[in-house]
Image: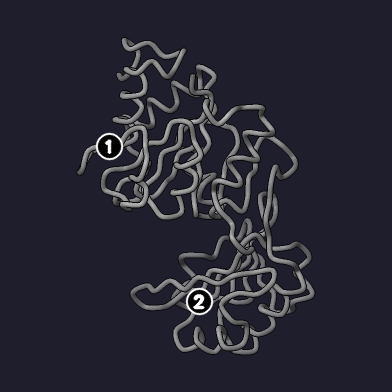
Amino acid sequence: MIKLIACDLDGTLLDSDARLRQASSTLLRRLWKDGIIVALATGRSWRTALKFQQQLGITGPIIAHNGGYVFDPRESYDTYRRDVPIATARRMLDWATAHQTMLRCYLGYRHPVIFNFFDDCHRTQFLRAEDVVLSRDAQNLTVNPLEIFLFGTHQIAPFIEEFGMRGRDYELVVFSHDNHQEINICAPDVDKVDALQFLCHTLRISRDSVMALGDGLNDVQMLAWAGTAVAIGDGAPECRINPRYVTALGSPDPVAEALLWAMDEGLFSTLSLEQRVD
């Protein structure tokens, strides 16, 4: 029987406008109330993951930063973290400030998000007085960052030339957006599956009791490990190598579809078929 659901966000639980879908939200909330652990597992930050957990109306562990971080808002400590050493992060912060390039450091739940400064195009999107600290002095960085983002256009290549794509204690991934590029810096080889395995070990839940749902390349290992793997039909082909179930192409709510399939298969011991949806 399934005791824990690990569910990806983008392309899986969220629609194309990055909003929760009603049917899947209702089913996940009911399963959670009946004792199933629902863990969001995302490449996004802890702050974004927490926002969607609160919208779902559930509590419990969250896997964020692409598997580099597991935390539970009910607890006062981090469950699991893979981070960038503070000495390396300070060198990057100093470089970014010297080159007038915006850099953001996520330190973890109950810690502020640190920027060295804001440029005008990001001020409205990112400036949040309750949890953002502006600091051009790298010595003010006193916690190992879980993830670092560097924003720029012409600064991306010089940063890579300075630090390389990979070091002993970090690796870089470059993302291109409409009006800027972004470098994501995290600990080497972070993966959702490592965080999920650690979480299940801590909770004494076997892999056979885990259901994982995902659509992207960062979900492949998690799906391969989980006892019940559900690949989103519109997602990456690599996710569909050996899943237990693949949702329909163009499914209006693939997570709800998958949960209803699991109920029909008798994989949940709690929620009756009559209670499935409103």
Task: Check the image and report above or below for 84 versus 95.
Answer: above
Q: Which residue is mark 1?
A: 247
Q: Position of residue 102 (x, y in %)?
A: 56, 78
Q: Secondary structure at mark 2?
A: strand
Q: Which residue is pictured at 42% across the width and 19% down the height?
A: 267
Q: In this image, 98 relative to 143: left or right?
A: left
Mark 2 crowdedness (10 Å alpha carbons): few <14, some 14-19, many ≥20: many
Which residue is nearer to you in this view: 266 or 124? 266
Q: Position of residue 158 (x, y in %)?
A: 54, 89
> Tags 2 and 1 in contact by the CB under 8 Å rule?
no
Task: Check the image and report above or below for 139 versus 162.
Answer: above
Can residue 57 be seen here? The reply is no
Task: Check the image and report above or below for 35 versus 9.
Answer: above
Q: Which residue is pictured at 46% across the width and 42% down the height?
A: 224
- Distance from disc 2 to disc 1, alpha carbons, whole Å, reads 36 Å
Find the residue positioned furthest to the front: 242
Q: Which residue is mark 2?
A: 151
Amino acid carrying mark 2 in the image:
Phe
Q: Position of residue 15 (x, y in %)?
A: 31, 46
In which quadrant is the C terminus drawn? top left
Mark 1 crowdedness (10 Å alpha carbons): few <14, some 14-19, many ≥20: many
